[in-house]
Amino acid sequence: MTLPETLQPLQGLLMISAFILGTVVGSFCNVCIGRWPAGESVIKPRSRCPKCLNSIAWYDNVPLISWLALGARCRHCKAPISMQYPIVEGLTGLLFLAVYWRFGLVFAAPVYMAFCASMVIVTFQDLADWTIPNEITFPGIPLGLVLALAGMAWGESSGLRVTDVFDAMLGMALGGGILFALDRITVFILKKPGMGFGDVKLLAMVGAFLGWRGTLGTLVIASMLGSMVGIATILYFRYFGDEADADTTTEEPEAAENQKTEKEATSSDEEITLEGHYLPFGPYLALGAVIYLFIGPEIIEAYFSIIVPAPEPIILYDGMELL
Ligand SMILES: [Zn+2]
């Protein structure tokens, strides 16, 4: 990361600021994750305790710190506050710090901070609600294209990964196209519910931000992570199957979990179809996109420099070419 000489003494301060900004944005991400699935506004009512509906004072809403200070419980009714809040805040803080560290003080830094924050929302909303918010993907797709256009005008000094709008358009079309085709194949040929249209829009957005290489890179990383987790889960249940079942039942009586199990219990048919077929692929795509953002192009470059070595120099000797 490069910083002008005169700004070097501010390095530590800038890093701390990036982290704190990330935790504040992460706090807003929590609001989005909680309200978007219910179709509620993320601005209008102040933050409230979901149990006792008392509004949360500013001093009880400081990212990370308030959760610890309150001992993970509401000040008024002592209802437990989910671990998701500090996890999302801390994670967003670390991602903002990493973006600043990786890209520096450039136009691309706030762009990729926002991109990482939206991937955090996608991950946690898909895990909790099995949906990927249109509130992210609908504006995200055109925004990615506009930013590539800006990168085209601005060039390398913008710090943007994609500085060619055609690359962004190809990435978007490829991302949407591959997953749309996969979805149709599963529905019409395998006669199973597809992977979900949210994933199609998500990979189209990732492609608009990261180009066609980014689309493929994200898909490869996501599939690898998905299969590793899949294999680990199968092995875990094979060897610790009974204990794992016992664990999940004791964890069940959490406030939010309860609602979900009640909803599922009322329609057991629906439960089977969702449980059996829906693959929450969003978190893997989001993580794949973030990994690609930070190190993807460098990995591709290193890979090709290994398998395609630089051409041997042609030695001219007495006017003859020796290869
Ligand atoms: Zn409360």
Image (cartoon, rainbow, N blue to C red):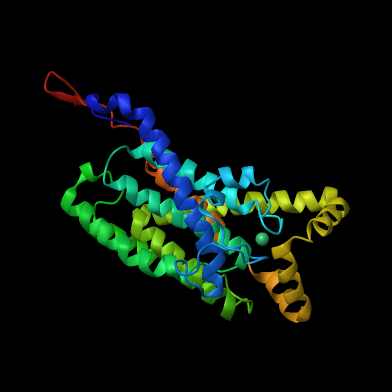
Who's the residue at 52% across and 61% down the image?
31
Q: Quadrant location of residue 176? A: bottom left
Residue 142, position as x, y percentages in the image: 31, 66
Image location of residue 123, percent across then percent down: 55, 57
Ligand 1 shown in quarter: bottom right
Q: Hey, which residue is sitting farthest top in the picture? A: 318
Give how far across and how far down residue 173 sits, in percent. Answer: 36, 67
Q: Nearer the viewer, residue 238 or 45?
A: 45
For residue 249, which quarter of the picture? bottom right
Q: Is residue 175 visible?
A: no
Foreground residue among 30 and 104: 30
Q: Along the horizontal axis of the image, is 174 left or right of 149? A: right
Q: Which one is in front, 99 or 226? A: 99
* Horizontal arrangement in the rendering, residue 173 relative to residue 40 (left or right): left
- The C terminus sits in image quarter: top left
Question: Residue 172 versus residue 268: which sits nearer the camera?
Answer: 268
Q: Is residue 75 visible?
A: yes
Left or right of residue 78: residue 315: left
In the displayed structure, 113 sits above or below 183; it is above
